Amino acid sequence: MQKMDSKIIDTRLGANNILVIIPHAGRASQNTAVAPMMTFGRKLAEHLHCFTIINGKYRPSIVDMNDVRAIRKRKKVTDGFLVRIREFKDEISENNLIPLVLIINKGTDEQPSDIILGYGQGERSRKDRPHRPTMAPSMLSKIRMSLEDNGFSTSIADTDSLLCGRESYCLNQLFRQKNYVDGFYDPTVRSLVVTIAPEKLADETCAADTSRRFLRALVDYADSMSLVRRVAVSAIETSKPQDLRYIFRVHGDNPKNDMIRESYIDELARSISANGLLHPLVLLQKKDGRYKILCGFRRFQAIRRLGRQWVEAKTLNEDDFTTEDFFNISLAENTKRRNLNPIEIGNFLESAGRELGLNNARLAEQFGESLAIGKPGANVSQSTIHKYRKLYQLRERGESPEMISDIINDKLRFSIAAEVLAPIKDPIDRDSLYLDIVKPLTPTRPQLIQIIKILHSIHPRLNMAISEPHVRKILEQAVHSSHKANSFIHGLRKAGEEQLEEKQQTFTSTIEALRKDVFGEKANKQDFNITRSAKGRKKSLTLHIRLQEQSMEQVVTNLKQLLTDEYRLKELHKLLKESSAS
């Protein structure tokens, strides 16, 4: 088992009807990493699979954990110790098993045997030594015989000794006293005080050996729970990020990512109320004595909304599988009834990549087939994985919330979202394109690519291009046409052609005015002209001048005049700028 801090109240979930309570495990010495009694309890929990509560935090001098009166004076101790005892007992009882509670203490060197057993025995009609049995003598005899068969010498506690657990304030009497501690009375519980000689807990090695022999004696009295059992809703943790590490169905735990419709949970709650829980939750038993959800987060939300105290669940031990196993189990369970939407696939891939340390290539290899993404019969590519994870990043950053919501609700195709919208880096541009263009016009992927190209020719920023008055006017007209996207593209192209023609006319008239002013009324295009030319992606202007021997001096003079005329130079600069933007 994983090493844990020994200065805690250590709680472990079990899989049978036995609840082991160690009121005082003691502290580790200089020669031991962990107190031997702590080793004994943890080994017992590990191999017997019993519910376990071990106090390694409070010393007897601070609070006597065998004395209910002392515990009840401290709320923190009550909540961390007594309440956990009740919760574990209730879970055993809720699964139709009879709890067997073993309260294990370390004895003294003077005790007459390896193990002393106390079951609340006293003497009838003696107030100073009341008879309050917590177990049938016949069952006690069987347990004692099993311990003897495994090499322990045993004896029954003297009625004059507190080791018999007959006093009303003893832990052994916790479930026998009416109106003593609210919620604990349950006469079906069988409990036993077990006092072990110090020599059997001398060090960690000795404690581990004692634990092995002790559990062999108890195996016959452990009634196992079924794989699917009843679990307390209050014992399921969802508050920490680690508790949700395998949850990739979209859920409403975070306000900024709250994409799930409340009506869905209400509908699910109504279905569970009418028909019962058709598919149990899948839970992991954590090392702290509680559960976290592997599959069924939304069912859990619906159960909690109904105010149910118990829920059916398939329970797995966190130590029995690897993290990779849990991701595979979670994926298999979640895809039984409904395929994942693209956002959920992105959530899964991001979580698996982070937790398992896998790059896109390994994720594609390991989970591509199970997720059923990509082309049928073909291996999933790294680029496909990248697209799904890109959508996750948009959701995680809280960007484009309506776009994400529409993907979840099948109102936006994954190909458009992942291949066209997600690569747009600026969220303002992306949201404007989606809300103003994609939603109202529903273009196909090729149509959307054409629209983006045209809008970029109007302005480098998409949201600025969409805000242009003539674009808004074309958009308004297209929304009311029968072929919206085509109408919008046609309108943009027509407007672009008109603008281009208008710019060309302006360009031509400007050149003609320059030619007339600088070179005279009789000059023609051969004498002076400016044309547009393209070099790669950048536009430029080319100056054409005719030089003749008889007029060379005049041409040079005219050029000097042009180059020193600030107004004319500004006109040329304006032409160059417009040419580059065209």
Image (cartoon, rainbow, N blue to C red):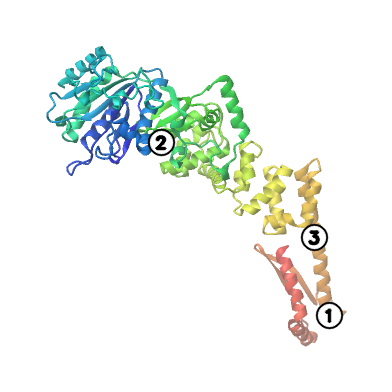
Seen in the picture, residue 27 relative to 229 is either above or below; the reply is: below
Q: Position of residue 318 (x, y in %)?
A: 37, 33
Q: Position of residue 277 (x, y in %)?
A: 53, 23
Query: Which mark sits nearer the N-terminus, 2 or 1?
Result: 2
Mark 2 Cα-neighbour bin, 10 Å: few <14, some 14–19, many ≥20: few
Mark 3, residue position? 499
Q: Secondary structure at mark 2?
A: helix
Q: Which mark is residue 517?
A: 1
Of 150 and 415, which appears nearest the observer? 150
Which of discs 2 and 1 lies nearer the camera? The answer is 2
Mark 1 Cα-neighbour bin, 10 Å: few <14, some 14–19, many ≥20: some
Query: Which mark sits nearer the N-terminus, 3 or 2?
Result: 2
Q: Position of residue 2 (x, y in %)?
A: 30, 37
Of 453 and 108, which appears nearest the observer? 108
Seen in the picture, residue 538 relative to 97 is either above or below; the reply is: below
Residue 566 appears anywhere in the view: yes
Which of discs 1 and 3 lies nearer the camera? The answer is 3
Residue 287 appears anywhere in the view: no
Amino acid, disc 2:
Glu
Kindly report the distance in space between the C-alpha atoms of the residues bearing marks 1 and 3. 27 Å
Q: Secondary structure at mark 1?
A: helix
Query: Which mark sits nearer the N-terminus, 1 or 3?
Result: 3
Kindly report the distance in space between the C-alpha atoms of the residues bearing marks 2 and 1. 80 Å
Mark 2, residue position? 324
Q: To which quarter of the image does residue 215 belong?
A: top left
* Residue that appears at 82% across and 63% down: 502
Q: Which mark is residue 289?
A: none
Amino acid, disc 3:
Gln
Q: Is residue 380 left or right of residue 202?
A: right
Q: Secondary structure at mark 3?
A: helix
Of 199 and 364, which appears nearest the observer? 199
